[in-house]
Amino acid sequence: MKKQRHLIQPVGVSIVAILFLITGTSALGTVTTSETQTTSRADVITIDIMTTFGKLERPPVTFLHDKHTDALKKMNKDCRSCHLTEKDKLLPKFKRTEDTDKQFVMDVYHNNCVACHKDTLAQGEPSGPINKCADCHKKNPETMSSRQPVGFDKSLHFRHSKAADKKCETCHHAYDKETKKLFYDKGKEGTCRYCHRDETEENRMSMSLAAHSSCIPCHTKTIAENKNAGPVQCAGCHDLENQKKIKKVEDVPRMDRKQPDTVIIRTGEEALDAPQTARMDFVPFDHKTHETKNNNCRVCHHEEMTTCNKCHTIKGDDKGGQVRLSQAMHKSKTAQSCVGCHEIMQQQKDCAGCHTMAARNAKMDQAACKTCHMAPADKTVGTSAEADAAMAAALLAERTVSGTYDLKDIPEKIAIKDLSDKYEAADFPHRKIVETLADNISDNKLATFFHTEKGTLCQGCHHNSPAAIKPPKCGSCHGEPFDEADMFKPGLVGAYHQQCMSCHENMGMTKPVGCTECHKKKES
């Protein structure tokens, strides 16, 4: 079988640099510094190619791409005035195909730019500098770049797929090492960035060059056919305000790449029919739901469209950057792991009220591990991907819990009397709060899976007791005053205020703001 390497792949995360608006304009901003007033634009290109040949003798040139494009358009000229073409594709370099030597590159710019400026002036039109080096090579440029990176999400992919009549080969290709040719490998599409990196490598263009050389000609051709197309100017994609105007498709249909709905996450080092060889039970994974929650596949499949254990092995592998499988799944404080991503989700305001406090008291024990590592009833894991998917679906269905205890079993109000020497007892609307918390997360699949018992929601406040319909009162742990032997355990009054006020703050609530909004002051 031929060895293959995928190059551009889905119109995925990145046909990045071009695609966003139907029309593009050069958006300008103004920034005032202590020395001068500086404009900012999305089309700023810094010409510093001479660094290839050593230290710069003069400051690099700030080139305004869209400004020049507009000027050429007025003269009925196009991109070919500056860029050479090859097989109907624009080459990225200015008036050359290679950087052969220092003097050659310098002459290309000086001769062509100055000549164009002179011709434009001769026609009575405003133009660029022609005499002084410092007019282009400025130590303190008057225009700074406001260029914003862009991404290719599910919405844009769907729009392009629809426009191309689902002909994925329009954008996707792979590279055959033996024939040294590009070809379309149906069913193995991935994102462009799987091969096109930030910098050009070997025979692979950088992501920026690949996007610009593929997308702009396509947009230009489509516009010439009097059809709607994406932008052809820098600001169309890279200006922040223009990015906000990009049309979003709601409820994007699921991308079809024969991906599973559910899978069993394995270590990769055990036999399909021998789960007992693994130290932990396997993890059933809801692939379809995770697709709907992310904008692209690279969120998880960040290097290639394969299973995690292909790169992240138990012991670590260079292909996975020596990040072990356990780290890839469990590492905290990072968006790239399962646990880390879930922690980020817990920071949403509907979840943060409980989880901010819960995180301080979290304990990783065997019970916590079993939240994800679930044992199949007969201990027989399927001998095929289809059997695995069926088992994963069954395990996930068993886990799902909806809501909390029946409202009639939850006290409607609780009188908190611990400050009754100065204030009236605080009437705590217990049932209303539980009901609100439950409603807020009723459509949250992460919560319905990980809230494994009906009392899980209660543990946001009753944080050190097992889930139960009648958990211990706060005073059973928090004494009056605080425990001198445990400085991390506040006294009862402190515990109430810390818990309530922290929850309100993390959920974005503006009230209450004063003592008497909870406690009526006693009559003197």
Image (spheres, rainbow, N blue to C red):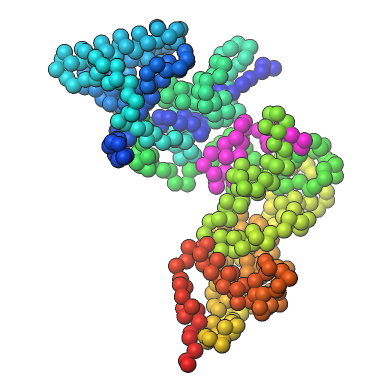
Residue 278 seen in the figure? yes
Instruction: Report the magenta stretch's main SS.
Output: loop
- Left or right of residue 340, residue 241 in this image: left
Residue 16 is covered by the magenta coloring: no
- Left or right of residue 70, residue 422 in this image: right
How far across and how far down the image is residue 55, in percent? Answer: 45, 17
Q: Which residues are magenta?
A: 290-316
Residue 291 is covered by the magenta coloring: yes
Q: Residue at x 68, y 41 (%)?
A: 328
Quadrant position of the N terminus in the picture: top right
Q: Is residue 477 above or below residue 41?
A: below
How far across and how far down the image is residue 388, in percent? Answer: 73, 42
- Left or right of residue 136, residue 258 in this image: right
- Asked whether 119 or 262 is in front, the reply is 119
How far across and how far down the image is residue 436, in percent? Answer: 53, 69
The quarter of the picture where residue 371 lies is: bottom right
Residue 28 seen in the figure? no
Q: Is residue 272 above or below residue 73?
A: below
Q: Is residue 383 above or below residue 408?
A: above
How far across and how far down the image is residue 420, in percent? Answer: 56, 86
Q: Residue furthest front?
A: 35
Q: Residue at x 66, y 57 (%)?
A: 450
